[in-house]
Image (tube, rainbow, N blue to C red):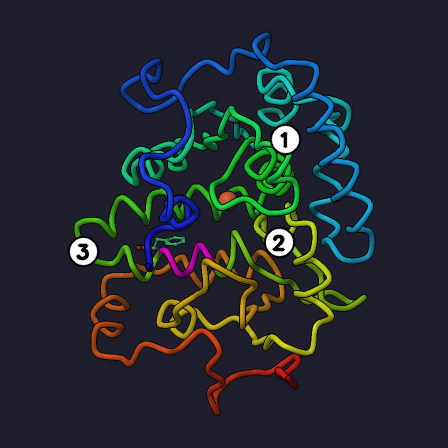
Amino acid sequence: DDLPAAYSFGATDNPPRGDYASARADFTCEQDWAAYTPEMHERYRRLYADRIAKLPGLACDEFMDGLTHMDSAEAIPRFEQVNVSLRRATGWEIAAVPGIIPETAFFSLLAQRRFPVTTWLREEHEFNYIVEPDVFHDFFGHVPLLYNPVFADYMQAYGEGGLKAQALGGLEYLARLYWYTVEFGLINTPSGLRIYGAGILSSGSEPQHSLFSPKPNRVGFDLLRVMASKYRIDDFQDTYYVIDSYKQLFDATAPDFTPYYTQLRGMPTYAANQVLASDRLFKAATK
Ligand code: PHE
Ligand code: FE
């Protein structure tokens, strides 16, 4: 079950949702904004309103700052319109895709500073929980942080690292890094722990859970420890990893991973809820 994060969401649903017939060779497609119905725009508007109301004081400042440039609260955004300010900020752009895409295509797009965003929107019965990423998760969860220069560079490096890991047998490890940072990461700030992971930010209930529930552990980020740790795709996380800054994340992942993959192959794999003596614990599970 340790597939790259872009896949894990869809692990239970085969084939993935979405119209792949009209995709290009690199798996990007047209957004076809005119095809969205008024009902879809209204559902998106309610999703945005529901989630944003839950995030003040919980989401990191960089996420909230990014959102202010996106003007996308009222209707499903036109990607090309958001791309104007995003390109200006960090040189990133959104690339429309039909849904989950193969890992090589995913890594290649990130390496080109193009973030794949699914075009379809979830159904009403999926308002609070969805297994596969849709336009709301991909756009609302991931795009705001791409306005932050350091995080933006991390994401590009991750894409390059993914292409490299394919030849080194390191994908399983790299997928865990993505999961515990890009999707479910927390950051330590002077005002306390805050959320930067897209999987938490786009969820209706995981923001509260990740910061305040007595159940999960919050452990200081340690690269090899994270890459050796399993994760849950079917429930809230048992452990959240806390970075001190995006610079810390970028610097920790800058070295050549080749020797890390060798080292990891000789290490035990940790359970998702395991606590190690060496962990820097922010908050231990108490239930
Ligand atoms: N520096 C890593 C390597 O050489 C690539 C990487 C960068 C991986 C950033 C993840 C995040 O493989
Ligand atoms: Fe995601």
Instruction: Let me know if residue 268 is in the magenta part.
Output: no
Under tag 1, what secondary structure? helix
Classify 10 Å Cα crowding around label 2: few (below 14), some (14-19), many (20 and above). Answer: many
Name the residue type under label 2: Ile
Q: Secondary structure at mark 2?
A: helix
**Residue 182 appears at what percent x and percent y?**
52, 52
Who comes first in sequence, dot 3 or dot 1?
A: 1
Contact flag, marks 2 and 3 (Cβ < 8 Å): no
Question: Is residue 233 found left or right of 196 in the rendered image?
Answer: left
Tell me the amino acid under the disc marked 1.
Ala
| Residue 212 coordinates in the image, percent (x, y) | 74, 70
Q: Tell me the residue at 27%/44% (across/down).
A: 163
**What residue sits 24% from the left and 74% below the top?**
263
Q: Which residue is mark 3?
A: 168
Looking at the rendered structure, the secondary structure element under dot 3 is: helix
**Residue at 61 percent of width and 34 percent of height:** 136
Q: Quadrant of the N terminus?
A: bottom left
Closer to the eye: label 1 or 2: 2
The earlier-in-sequence mark between 2 and 3 is 3
| 42 in relation to 4, above or below | above
The residue furthest bottom is: 277
Per the rendering, the mark at residue 200 is: 2
- Location of the C terminus by quadrant is bottom right
Q: Is residue 247 left or right of residue 211?
A: left
Q: Which residue is mark 1?
A: 89
In the image: residue 211, left or right of residue 164: right
Identify the magenta region: 175-179
